[in-house]
Amino acid sequence: MKSAPPRAALLLAGWLLPGGGYLVLRRYGRFAVSLALVAAASLAGLFLRGGNLWPETAELQGLDGVAVLLARAGAVAKAAAGGPYLLARAAGYAQGYLGGCVHEYGTAMLVLAGLLNLMAVAGAWELHPVERRL
């Protein structure tokens, strides 16, 4: 019987390549669907000029604590898209927090891409066979 891949491989593959955890587990249909959904949401967010940078301190001046927390949580969620996020940054796409607020739909799509990818990583984690010890 083949040994299962390490769970760390699922996490890394799933973050770098949307649905990559499913690919490691040889669940090709789930991989294809996850990749397509995250890539489509990322592209839609970029075309709608959504913000993808960590909010600067000056941009958060005058906001209450909850708004600051939500701005930072949104930045983390966008980065959770993994590969598409890294490709956009490597290609030079950089839209700041305030600029991204003007284009809310794009920013929402970038957050959606990250959350969809986290769902795919969690799904692959759940499918990982755990060795039972007696």
Image (spheres, rainbow, N blue to C red):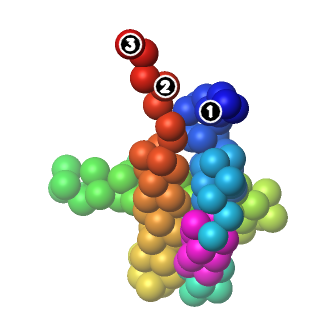
Amino acid type for the residue under numbered disc 3: Leu
Work out whether 112 lies above or below 53. below
In percent of width and height, residue 25 lies at 63, 48
Q: Give the residue at x 19% y 50%.
A: 65
Q: Give the residue at x 61% y 54%.
A: 22
Task: Kindly check if marks 1 and 3 are in contact, taking CB atoms under 8 A apart as contact.
Answer: no
Q: Nearer the viewer, residue 131 or 95?
A: 131
In percent of width and height, residue 40 lies at 62, 80
Identity of the residue furthest to the top in this view: 134
Task: Say which of marks 1 and 3 sits in front.
Answer: 3
Q: Marks 1/3: CA distance? A: 18 Å
Q: Give the residue at x 45% y 71%.
A: 112
Q: The residue tagged with tag 1: helix, strand or loop?
A: loop
Residue beneath disc 1: 4
Q: Is residue 99 visible?
A: no
In percent of width and height, residue 100 lies at 49, 74
